[in-house]
Image (cartoon, grey):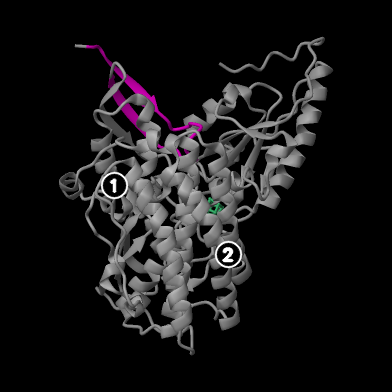
Amino acid sequence: MAKKTLVPFGPQHPVLPEPVHLDLVLEDETVVQAVPQVGYVHRGLENLVDKRDFQQFTYIAERICGICSFGHSMGYSQAVENLMGIEVPERAEYLRVIFHEMSRMHSHLLWLGLAADAFGFESLFMHSWRLRERLLDIFERTTGGRVILNFCIPGGVVHDIENTELEAIVSTLRGMREDYDQIAATFLDDASVRSRLSGVGYLSKADARTYGCVGPMARASGWDVDVRNNGLGAYSALADFKPVTSQDGDCYARCQVRVEEVRQSIDIITELASKIPDGETLVKIKGNPAEGAESLTRIEQPRGEAIYYIKGNGTKFLERCRVRTPTSTNIPGMCATLGGSDLADVPNIVLTIDPCISCSER
Amino acid sequence: MSVKDTSKKGASYVKKSPWIIHYDAASCNGCDIEVLASLTPLYDVERFGIINTGNPRHADIFLVTGSVNEQAKPVIEQIYSQMVEPKVVIACGICACSGGVFKTCYNTMGGIDQVIPVDVYVPGCAVRPEALIDGVVRALDILEQKRAAMDAGLPVPTPEVKLGVETPRVLHTQDDPDESGTPIEPAAQGGEGAKR
Ligand code: SF4
């Protein structure tokens, strides 16, 4: 039997912008075990509910993660609305979903770029990020921010987006789609991409269930979990929604699922923009959360299901806020997938779960 | 491990394209993706010869995003000490400048200047790529000054690390959510802050 070696992976490394740290136990070139080390980006922001009232905390919640920032503010706002029994205007629900889907697209394009970088396809990285800038332009034009939007608050959204603006968004996305199809074709059909990703990091459906995987990671293993399926908020207005799945369970399948989800998001936005009702976009919240009131909401973030739990204590400060983010749920699955893989494939496998460390460590 | 004492008279320092190294201390990612966005086609700093490297020895500019915590501190110090003089540190985003929204979190030490000397502060939440590029341009001037000092055999001008003068950690009382809360001794903080 070969000698076992321990190789540290991270926290500072060229591929990933975030400090992921894994201790890899190797036997020759094969990974026997992967042990994640956490805490590099732990800030302890859930504890800030002591110091920021429940309305101010929306901005903190948004800064759990800069990539899925809109989703976090939306999940937190929904939790507060549940807690206090607030009915959100329908137009605001639609706008939320439209922005949430746009941030899913920007997150997936970002991921596609990083994945291309990880398997050594630099120009594909550049093209993905070039396309992503068009979404950031939309964000900047409509909300003023490029990555942190401060658009969704408890009670609705901060301001209305006019119908003409929505049309402009839809036409931008339509234009994007042609360029996107070219990139997507490279991701899915290029021989070098296939040879780097096919058969790498296999996770079976049974394992995905055992390890409780969520999001594209679970869907790529043929398990169609998707919170959007439950038809909460404006998702109920969609004529037809079916989670994108793949049966293969390898890195290629995970890439495929994300590639398709971008197209799906464009469809969702186009459909909702054509159906959006007129009306108010914000209701004022009066009073404080009741003592002992609890609420729990789930939303589908780009990386999978995120859960928000909050508890009131009768004052404007919350008693507790707890967020369970998709990456922390996916890490056991990732470590299982890493076992038995080659050392050279580790960056690819780590990347295909789309790790978001600042989400999972908060 | 630090390579500080190379500033002998007679050694000459070649002017070169600035290479950067980026580390995410404890940020929310917002600033990191903006750092990466400045490397991609719309902003494209690579056309100025600015390259993102993963090797501290190759880098002239250290971009740090996010507020520092105890776990990230040794990593930042290590990267900083492995970089060769002249070097410049840029704090990207308001978190890296002062701790930002996370300043009062229990696991946050504050800005990057608590740990290593910072030359340029670039505020913004998230930092905009334009601001970031402006920060890098300023850093180039500072790099030039440092290089000139080294050529002349003088000590390299380095800003102070502010660890000794740590901004008091403020814990707010429930009815005083503003920045003007009463500072609490670190010992007392364990009891109060660890409430849940
Ligand atoms: S400055 Fe803002 S965007 Fe940047 S890391 Fe801090 S919270 Fe995130």
Give residue A334's position: percent from left, percent from top.
28, 40
Front of the two marks 2 and 1: 2
Q: Which mark is residue A108?
A: none
Query: Do the dots labelled 2 and 1 sit on one chain?
Result: yes
Within-10-Å neighbours for mark 1: few <14, some 14–19, many 20+:
many
* Residue at mark 2 to residue at mark 1: CA–CA distance: 34 Å
Question: Depth check: B188 or A226 in front?
Answer: A226
Residues drawn in magenta: A2-26
Give residue A77's position: percent from left, percent from top.
39, 72
* Sequence-earlier tag: 2 or 1: 2
Residue type at tag 1:
Asn
Residue at 60% in and 71% down: A142
Quadrant containing the N terminus of chain A in the rendered view:
top left
Residue at 47% in and 73% down: A270
A15 in the magenta segment: yes
Check disc 1 and report the residue beneath it: A330
Residue type at tag 2:
Gly
Within-10-Å neighbours for mark 2: few <14, some 14–19, many 20+:
few
**Does A253 sit above or below residue A157?**
above
SS type, badge 2: helix
Name the subunit of mark 1. A
**Does A232 sit above or below residue B77?**
below
> Would residue A8 be visible to someone looking at this image?
yes
Residue at 35% in and 53% down: A257
Q: Report how many numbered discs are placed on residues in the image.
A: 2
Name the subunit of mark 2. A
Check disc 2 and report the residue beneath it: A175
Q: Is residue A268 left or right of residue A223?
A: right
Give residue A350's position: percent from left, percent from top.
36, 38
